[in-house]
Amino acid sequence: MSGLKGIAKNLTASFSSHLVNVLQQLVLTPLFLHNYGAAGFGQWLTLSASVSYLGTLDFGIQTFVNQDLTVRYHRGDMQDFHMQQSTALRMLLGIVLVVACLATLVLALPLEHWLRMDGTGSGTAIPGRIVRATIYVLALQVLASILFGFFAGQFLVLGRAHIGLYWSNIKVTAQILAAIPCLLLHTSFLVIALTQLAALLVCLLGTLGTLYRTGRDIFPTLRYWDSTAVPKILGPSGYFALIFSSNFLVFQAPVLILQRSGGPIAVAIFSITRTIFSMTRNVMNAFTQAIGPEVTTLYARGDWPRLTRLYDFSERIVFALIPIVNIGTLFLCPLLLTLWLHKPQLFLPSIYILCAAVSIVMSSKEHKFQFQFSTNTHRELARFMFATYLLLVAAWFVLVPRFGIEGLLSAWLLIEFIQVLYIMHLNTRFFAHHQILDRKYPIRLMLLSLAILAAGAAVLPRTAHFALYQQAAIAVAIGAAILTLDLPLFKLLPLLPTIRTLASRR
């Protein structure tokens, strides 16, 4: 599947995926806060963050292999296809089983003391056996998700990546539905983790059944093994592991640092702020992720003219959306906190403006690195991201105890901006033999966002106290004004016929 039809189907699946993730936050966050309090919510986030790094233990195998298998499939190299697929699956199963056994050691470690959940922190004391058992079950969830991601990614080979995304949506929805009664009944964290693990395993079986019916000729098997392929897989896939490790460093490490220095309430405030912008940014990024399979296919075919047009088309669309979505969300935050969590006092203008700025830069980066990520040309990107995020975490250990969340977000913003500049350099080199990339759109996005955020810093402390309908009207008016500026800045009018075609095919 290629062209606009393929992008349209991937867009629908990706967009619905992000909507499901938004639903997860909209439903579970207020239930946690209502039934467990801000401190309890912060403790749950800390427990989840403590095992999230296990997700990198697939060493990027599933991402690299699924994209590599797509290239082999389109080239008709089926013998090597099955050898590569079976070898990778054996490696993943070995990793998951070994780590699951080693993880039982956490049942004997004083994790409740290390995480300050024994009553020494600002939260309620949790029995040590519950803390340790919950962390172990959450670890099993992460490990099972590695296998789920590999099987769901196999649909990319068939040109039906949207089916894998739909199963991911079903998995998240099932975990939401499993958690709701647990939260309403105020069960222990261990029961919540167990019910979500059960939902994940059921969806894993469903994904396997769908893959067998859809593509029997590519259904994974354990019959083959090529020891010489192991270093060839681990080499490039290891760079994906660095990228996923970077995600841990920037999304989970600050939670653990805040838990140690500020306690679970600081964790809850930071996570709620970040969640609001993550939800909206992820929905907007549905288009960027939808073009990922198309980028892989065009690169495999060597169709550089269409790949170049796709780059230009997507950049103009995504860069036009970035300020509308992020700045519109910024002005809606007081209203969202009132209607969603009934806690308007959580709106702190300086924190939310900084988070909006981080989200704008991250949105730009997530679009730009798609062309390295989806073509397995990600080695330099992975090294740079991992190194700069290590520096960021080191800076957080110094800044967070002194400056709190504002210090955390300021350092984060600087590192994200540096990464965007480097990725723009990589993109220029990626297309160097086919087209010289114009940097006018990134510059226009930066200047437009800076101007509006500066104005927001002056007016938000006042508008945050307006009536809710006035806040909504201001956010809509700002979004409309930005859209009006976007039309000439990003030359959107010539793209309207293509956008209409894409929407009709979707």
Image (tube, rainbow, N blue to C red):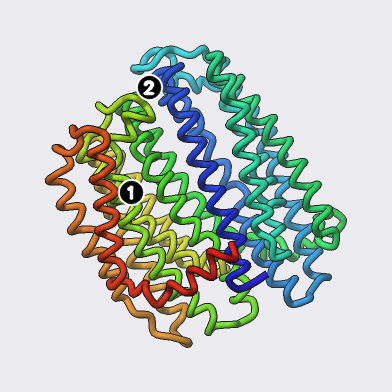
Report x, y in % for residue 96: 69, 42
Q: Is residue 180 left or right of residue 416?
A: right
At 73% from the left and 64% from the top, the residue drawn is 158
Residue 33, percent across and down? 41, 22
Using the image as rendered, state which of residue 405 and residue 455 is in the foreground. 455
Q: Residue 345 sits in which quadrant? A: top left
Residue at horizontal 19%, vertical 34%?
466
Closest to the observer, 297 or 389: 297
**Is 31 situated above or below 238?**
above
What secondary structure is marked by label 1? Answer: helix
Q: Residues within 10 Å of mark 1 (few under 14, many from 20)?
A: many
Is 228 drawn above or below residue 33 in the view shown? below
Do we see residue 381 in this rendering? Answer: yes
Instruction: Mark 2: give few (<14), some (14-19) or many (20+) Cα within 10 Å.
Output: many
Quarter that holds the N terminus:
bottom right
Q: Is 167 in front, or is 129?
A: 167
Which label was assigned to residue 392? 1
Taking the image as shown, residue 120 lies to the left or right of residue 461, namely right
Q: Position of residue 489 (x, y in %)?
A: 28, 71
Task: Give the mark, 1 or 2, whose residue is nearer the N terminus.
Answer: 2
Q: Amino acid at mark 1?
A: Leu
The residue located at (43%, 72%) in the rendering is 496
Is 359 placed left or right of 246 in the picture? left
Q: Disc 2 designates what residue?
A: 38
